Amino acid sequence: MPDNIIEIEHVSKRFGRVVALDDVNLTVKQGEVLVIIGPSGSGKSTLLRCINHLEAVDSGHIVVDGIPLTQAENIDKVRAEVGMVFQLFNLFPHLTALENVTLAQRVVRKRSQEEAERIAHELLAKVGIPEKANAYPAQLSGGQQQRVAIARALAMQPKIMMFDEPTSALDPEMIKEVLDVMLDLAEEGMTMVVVSHEMGFVKAAAHRIAFMCDGHILEEATPEGLLTECKEERTKQFLSEILI
Amino acid sequence: MTSDRIIRETKTLLPAQEAEARPLLQRFDRWWLLFAGVLLMVFLLVTRRPDPYRRIVVFLEDGIRVTLGITVVSFLFILLAGLVGGLGRISKNPLINGIASIYVEVVRGVPLLVQLLFIYYASPIVIRGVGKKLVDVWPAVAELLINIKLNPFVAAVGGLTICYGAYMSEIVRAGIESIPKGQMEAARSLGMSYFQAMRYIILPQAVRVILPPVGNEFVALLKDSSLVSVVAVADMTRRGREFMASTFLALETWMMVALLYLVMTLFFARVVAYIERKMSFAR
């Protein structure tokens, strides 16, 4: 099945006695925008982190872009195809915004300094902060830092972008500038897996929504039918809480 | 907007820039006073009372060179040992981690003086013993081992490296562990390998964190290098003992030796503080 870019089959993961993922099955199609919602501790972040192997699964299979993660000879190759944006940005504080975006291009993609910088300048313009290229992360606002982080991930020209609560550490007035960048990406047809409770983004960009609870994917729905399609009591309760 | 920017830029002023901005007079702090005082005392003693102080300094001169040489050479090896040991201590591989942990725990539990004595006097016996066992298996290497003669300088550098390498490993480990986990995750998620992430992301940040303790180690090493005088290295301390043995001027000799150590340690402590200031960055 070439159009399924991520396939997750019977994946389980536990941390000590805590079951983080319990027999999760999920597929993501090429060009699809999937939003995962659910209460905290339900395993959303763990699922994302398993997809690029920041966490190893205990059992089950994950296939990304046709490469099974468990058998991948070079996990770094898979990771370079999957961009990841973190809740706390995780920019490299000792490097400027430009260097944050160029470093992995040079050492992983083996691009020349000039080419990497050209791509970095393009991407910083794309996320709306071309003038901040020489600023250090500490000199940027949260929203600007997160946009640099998105540019850094995009510089690897990934086939999939994953966002782990990209706006939940931001002040309200900065959320929009990050969501706008994400909406642009979705419109360009990027395959995206997003953990977020930003209902504005969900309505505007999501193709599909998965609701996670206690390590399971409880149900899936389309954004239009979010309130009508959901049958589980737990989902309805959660939605009523976040949709005030 | 403008005032906002000014505030932010003021906050991120690097300490180095702050220092440049301070008036010249304030930069002559108590350290300068002490350093100048010690230098003046050495100078006065040597010029006003050339007998015996000038004689002592002349006699100690090559000892000073040996002390500095041993300290600098050892320190380079110690940095290397600390990096390898520190990476070993955080390794998830149980074998590597186990070896690094045993090394650190054993070495930290044995006094430096005992380690130096062991290396100089006892380890050649061990090496010769190994050589004798290898005679049939590998004659060429066996002969080399049996005829080994430990150069005092090599023994001193080896002993200091093994001992201080263990402490340095712990400093490096603590420095690496002080960098948030998200940094490694971000680097790995971009496709960098573990060692690429270490080299480009973790270590450059860790170096800034560990610079103060590493600098302290250098100054401590300079002082502890006096212990190598027991393994036939003619460092400053040993030269002092030789001078005292021939002249019986205990007070004059050891006062001058102490003053010269103080000049060196004060000087290097200041150099370390200077490098620290230059390398700090706005977080």
Image (tube, rainbow, N blue to C red):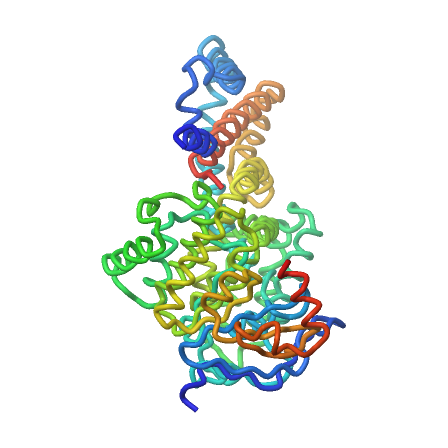
Asked if residue B62 can be seen in this view, the reply is: no
Q: Position of residue B266 (x, y in %)?
A: 52, 26
> In the depicted view, which residue is nearer to us: B243 or A17?
A17
Residue under the point 48% across and 11% down: B44
Relative vertical location of residue B64 with respect to residue A23 in this rendering, above or below: above
The x and y percentages for residue B176 are 55, 53
Q: How many marks?
A: 0
Please give the name of the residue rendered at 61% of the width and 78% of the height, measured from the top-left corner.
A229
Position in image of residue B73 (x %, y %): 45, 46
Q: Position of residue B116 (x, y in %)?
A: 61, 49
Whether residue A203 is visible = yes
Position of the N terminus of chain B by quadrant: top left
Question: Is A18 left, or right, of B64 in this rendering?
Answer: right
Residue closest to the eye, A95 or B88:
A95
Q: Quadrant of residue B121?
A: bottom right
Which residue is depicted at the point 33% across and 68% down? A109
Q: Looking at this view, is A125 or B15 the one in front?
A: A125
